[in-house]
């Protein structure tokens, strides 16, 4: 007998992605509602969570740890990509949407925030976003 991998609920993944995007934008638009000591890191963690949930929309049968690792690699690649300052990338990052997606300056603290966001999203994914068999 073959075991069938559980499958993510795509609609819940979409909902989680949209909710996290809204929270991330709100964290940047209204930073006064968050502790000042956290700085921009809640937004970074939420960005990483969004990557996990967005990947989950398409990778419905991928194991949670694989999804989390893939998301973390994407987040780290984007962050390390900020060390590249070619004119066309600088121009792309100057646009508000480009800045939201690609960021602008490298920061080691961002890697910690991404790791925390991916870990939280992985826990949510494992606990709530799979179909039960």
Image (cartoon, rainbow, N blue to C red):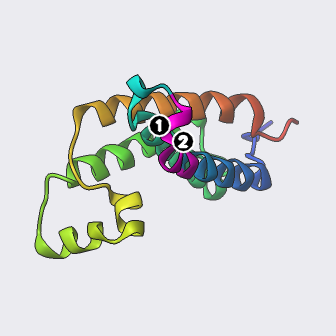
Q: Residues within 10 Å of mark 1 (few under 14, many from 20)?
A: many
| Identity of the residue drawn at 74% across and 52% down | 15
Q: Main secondary structure of the magenta part?
A: helix
Observer-nearest of 59 and 122: 122
Q: Quadrant of the N terminus?
A: top right
Residue labelled with disc 2: 49
Residue farthest to the front, as pictured: 32
Determine if the magenta segment contains residue 30: yes
Q: Quadrant of the C terminus?
A: top right
Whether residues under marks 1 and 2 lie with C-beta atoms below 8 angstroms apart, the answer is yes
Residue farthest to the right, as pictured: 133
In the image, residue 90 lies at what x, y percent? 19, 68
- Above or below 57: residue 66: above
| Identity of the residue drawn at 61% across and 45% down | 23
In the image, residue 32 lies at what x, y percent? 51, 36
Q: How many marks?
A: 2
Residue labelled with disc 1: 45
Q: What's drawn in magenta, residue-wise? A: 25-34
- Above or below 115: residue 97: below
Determine if the magenta segment contains residue 105: no
- Above or below 26: residue 124: above
């Amino acid at each position: 007998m073959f075991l069938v991998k559980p499958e993510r609920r795509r609609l819940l993944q979409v909902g989680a992605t949209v909710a996290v995007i809204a929270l991330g934008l709100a964290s940047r638009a209204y930073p006064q509602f968050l502790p000042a000591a956290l700085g921009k890191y809640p937004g970074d963690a939420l960005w990483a969570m969004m990557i996990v949930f967005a990947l989950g929309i398409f990778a419905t049968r991928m194991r949670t740890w694989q999804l989390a690792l893939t998301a973390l690699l994407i987040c780290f690649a984007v962050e390390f990509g900020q060390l590249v300052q070619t004119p066309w990338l600088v121009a792309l990052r100057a646009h508000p949407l480009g800045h939201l997606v690609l960021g602008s300056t490298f920061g080691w603290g961002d890697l910690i925030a991404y790791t925390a966001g991916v870990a939280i999203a992985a826990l949510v994914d494992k606990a709530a976003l799979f179909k039960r068999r």
